[in-house]
């Protein structure tokens, strides 16, 4: 059976920790979308790691880590991540890469930078990892699948054609140096050596694994708000962040995804631009940012300070609904122990109309948060293992949010470590 771990919000909800924790009992962990533009932070016995491309299961000996066809595969980043974890004492993980995964080409990263430069102040807050140019090319059908590395002559021909198109833009729109197809070809041959041992037909492998009764975890990147269809378009990412897309991006039957664990953080945070209704500013924000996550709310990939705010029930209900949530994992709750009272955004005020429905982007820009304040619990909750042992106000906070979002909170994370988790019956 398949379980998916996905985000309800803007990303950075703590999916890495939840996946790492669930991976203990899983056989296979699959990345099915996104690329090296966001990261997971994982704290375990080997140390603290920021993973961008590798699935969060790489720290276990018993799991196989799979890069699905839906991923934007940056091969040098993957190589660096493998070298990094193995140099820190982690045994070489079992890795499989879909022969249909497409590669982030060196020029995708350049085009991302050039476009941000061109847009200047009007930019989308890209992480400049080449993700948007990559997916544009994928759907324009001029992308490169991993299997093409093994067909030298056709690869050379295709590179020539693609460079011809790219060079027009480089010369006339961006005024930048042109691409050389031969140099690109040589670089790709180096990439081929790096990935050759891992490439296989991933969907066939997963199909067989399902028949054998193996447990598969799909690991999502970012969250519902960043989905290109259902998120805060255009301030979204370029591949679907929804569990449903797991079927496509991993090549598995949709009906096999039996459990959808949607991760949501006990307060809000976001990186990059875009409407963020319950955002807070000034000293109040600085304090939450500094205390947040594990060592502050700063991006795992970019180091950028994250925007922070109070919990948003409107966005989270919508985010959980779009994911098809069966279970909610409520994370980073320990961080809120310093507050006397905690505002929770329960509705939006849009031009004087109060709503709990998450609107489209134009209206979202106008939305003002409607807050209810809940009393804080004013103590450290790390180390607590049983739900009943949480302070009463803390339980009230969880139950209040559970009711507003309308999906059962069955896991509560009260610290960054694997064992900092409280399970709760539905
Ligand atoms: P992801 O992209 O959804 O995996 O999230 P990130 O890894 O970017 O952000 C989550 C951050 O919070 C990481 O630094 C985690 O180590 C940390 N974290 C996860 N769960 C908890 C928790 O329950 N409490 C605390 N204090 N930190 C947590």
Image: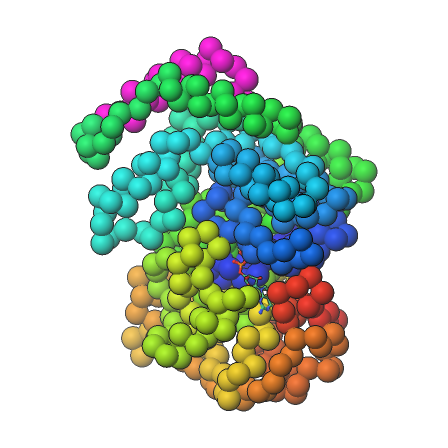
Task: Give residue 17's position: percent from left, percent from top.
Answer: 62, 59
Q: Residue shown at 56%/81% (left/top)? A: 337
- The foreground one among 280 and 327 is 280
Task: Give residue 75's position: percent from left, percent from top.
Answer: 51, 33
Task: Give residue 141's position: percent from left, percent from top.
Answer: 41, 27
- The foreground one among 193 and 131 is 193
Relative vertical location of residue 274 with respect to residue 116 in this rendering, above or below: below
Q: Residue shown at 34%/58% (left/top)? A: 273
Q: Is residue 250 left or right of residue 343?
A: right
- The foreground one among 409 and 125 is 125
- The foreground one among 238 and 179 is 179
Which region shows up in magenta? 147-169
Instruction: Assign the magenta stretch its main secondary structure.
Output: helix
Figure quadrant, ligand 1: bottom right
Q: How is the image coloured?
A: rainbow
The part of the image, by quadrant, that contains residue 382 is: bottom right
Q: Residue shown at 35%/64% (left/top)? A: 275
**Is residue 3 one of those drawn in magenta?**
no
Q: Is residue 29 left or right of residue 192?
A: right
Q: Does residue 412 appear in the picture of this structure?
A: yes
Task: Give residue 371's position: percent from left, percent from top.
Answer: 43, 82
Q: How many marks?
A: 0
Q: Residue shown at 40%/13% (left/top)? A: 157
Relative vertical location of residue 122 with respect to residue 210 in this rendering, above or below: below
Q: Does residue 314 appear in the picture of this structure?
A: no
**Is residue 160 one of those drawn in magenta?**
yes
The part of the image, by quadrant, that contains residue 283 is: bottom left
């Amino acid at each position: 059976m398949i379980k998916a771990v996905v985000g309800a919000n803007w990303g950075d909800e703590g999916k890495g920790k939840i996946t790492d924790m669930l991976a203990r009992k899983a056989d296979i962990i699959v990345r099915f979308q996104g690329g090296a533009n966001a990261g997971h932070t994982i704290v375990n016995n080997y140390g603290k790691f920021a993973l961008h491309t590798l699935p969060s299961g790489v720290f276990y000996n018993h799991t196989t880590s799979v890069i699905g066809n839906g991923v934007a595969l940056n091969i040098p980043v993957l190589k660096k991540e493998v070298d990094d974890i193995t140099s820190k004492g982690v045994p070489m993980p079992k890795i499989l890469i879909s022969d249909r995964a497409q590669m982030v080409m060196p020029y995708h990263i350049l085009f991302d930078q050039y476009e941000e430069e061109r847009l200047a102040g009007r930019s989308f807050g890209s992480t400049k990892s080449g993700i948007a140019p990559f997916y544009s090319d994928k759907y324009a059908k001029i992308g490169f699948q991993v299997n093409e590395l093994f067909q030298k002559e056709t690869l050379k021909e295709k590179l020539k054609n693609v460079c011809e198109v790219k060079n027009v833009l480089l010369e006339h729109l961006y005024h930048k140096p042109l691409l050389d197809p031969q140099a690109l070809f040589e670089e790709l041959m180096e990439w081929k050596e790096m990935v050759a041992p891992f490439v296989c037909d991933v969907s066939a492998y997963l199909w067989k694994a399902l028949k054998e009764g193996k447990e598969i975890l799909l690991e999502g990147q970012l969250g519902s708000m960043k989905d290109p269809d259902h998120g805060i378009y255009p301030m979204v990412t370029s591949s679907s962040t929804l569990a449903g897309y797991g079927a496509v991006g991993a090549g598995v039957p949709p009906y096999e995804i039996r459990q959808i664990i949607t991760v949501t953080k006990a307060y809000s945070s976001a990186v990059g631009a875009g409407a963020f209704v319950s955002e807070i500013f000034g000293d109040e924000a600085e304090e939450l940012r500094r205390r947040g996550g594990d060592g502050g709310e700063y991006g795992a990939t970019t180091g950028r300070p994250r925007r922070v705010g109070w919990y948003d029930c409107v966005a989270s209900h919508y985010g959980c609904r779009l994911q098809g949530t069966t279970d909610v994992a409520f994370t980073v709750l320990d961080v809120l122990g310093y507050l006397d009272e905690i505002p929770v955004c329960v509705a939006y005020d849009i031009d004087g109309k109060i709503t709990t429905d998450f609107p489209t982007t134009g209206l979202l820009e106008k939305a003002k948060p409607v807050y209810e304040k809940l009393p804080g619990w004013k103590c450290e909750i790390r180390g607590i293992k049983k739900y009943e042992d949480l302070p009463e106000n803390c339980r009230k906070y969880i139950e209040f949010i559970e009711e507003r979002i309308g999906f059962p909170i069955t896991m509560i994370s009260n610290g960054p470590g694997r064992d900092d988790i409280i399970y709760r019956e539905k």
